[in-house]
Amino acid sequence: MGPTGPERAVPEQRRGRCRPVTAEERQRQIVRAARRTGSVDVTALAAELGVAKETVRRDLRALEDHGLVRRTHGGAYPVESAGFETTLAFRATSHVPEKRRIATAAAELLGDAETVFVDEGFTPQLIAEALPRDRPLTVVTASLATAGALAEAGSTTVLLLGGRVRPGTLATVDHWTTKMLAGFVIDLAYIGANGISRDHGLTTPDPAVSEVKAQAIRAARRTVFAGVHTKFGAVSFCRFADIGALETIVTSTLLPAPEAHRYSLLGPQVIRV
């Protein structure tokens, strides 16, 4: 990433001279801060870095062009990539009211399904917890958290897919997981993603996770994607499905209606709650 904005001078200990901080160094600091805290604010960054707000805005535009952040009104948040992914613990603290609304609406799409795949991630876990407990249901999942949340539900049978457990998300992956999934025919799959875009479909940072998600979609008669508005337009490393593979997209009203309509033109029903 080359320089994209003005430089400033900071003290350099050696020989008592000042060394200019390059735009690349400043942008690296911004990415580190965004990944550490989950988001950054233009005003706070300008004060911390000792530069003008417009310089920070130029830095954020450059970082967005490189796929490292997504800009928001007054700031930005980090984009998950092959080199960076948020943990389940972090996801459980961000956009929680929005995720709960989405999960409730997604669970209402169950219909007459008797076998359900629930993906890894916090929103799918909330969907699993919102599923009815007054009827027999078999839930297949790679998520240890989801399996634990449903284990004591009397009418629900939980099948936890075997495999290597990823520490950040507490979900299983690799050939053990996909081989087990390949033996099932599932009525409904609830799928999450790190990014969803009209050009690149559904994406996730880790190839092993991508394989599990793709196999779940192949095994399912119906597929529902559920995700917060910040997922839309984001693109991660591994593509695992096209938009047309989805029956329904469930998100919130924070995704603008015109953009939701553009996704619906690719095939799925789009529900905003």
Image (spheres, grey):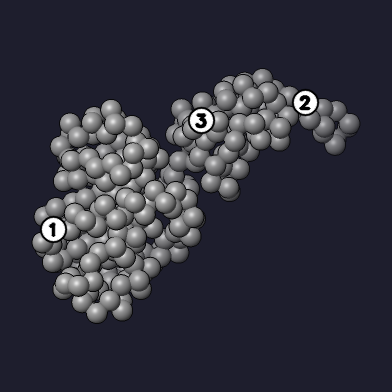
Judge from the rendering whether residue 250 lies leftward or rightward of residue 26; answer left or right. Answer: left
What residue is shown with label 1? 111
At x 20%, y 35%, the residue is 264
Q: Earlier in the sequence, mark 1 or mark 3?
A: 3
Three-letter amino acid code at disc 3?
Answer: His
Location of residue 27 by image quarter: top right
Quote the CA–CA distance across marks 1 and 3. 39 Å
Location of residue 197 by image quarter: top left
Q: Is residue 56 visible?
A: yes
At x 34%, y 51%, the residue is 101
Q: Earlier in the sequence, mark 3 or mark 2?
A: 2
Q: Earlier in the sequence, mark 2 or mark 1?
A: 2
Split into 4 quadrants, where in the image is the N terminus? top right
Three-letter amino acid code at disc 1?
Answer: Gly
Q: Are the residues at dot 1 and dot 3 in contact (C-beta closer than 8 Å)?
A: no
Quote the CA–CA distance across marks 3 and 2. 29 Å
At x 22%, y 40%, the residue is 270
Q: Say which mark, if any, is on residue 9.
A: 2
What residue is shown with label 3? 73
Which one is nearer the viewer's eye here, 34 or 248? 248
Image height of 177 relative to 222, above or below = below
Judge from the rendering whether residue 32 lies leftward or rightward of residue 262; answer left or right. Answer: right
Which one is nearer the viewer's eye here, 65 or 43? 43
At x 19%, y 63%, the residue is 116
**What is the x, y in percent for residue 147?**
32, 71
Quote the CA–CA distance across marks 2 and 1. 63 Å
Split into 4 quadrants, where in the image is the C terminus? top left
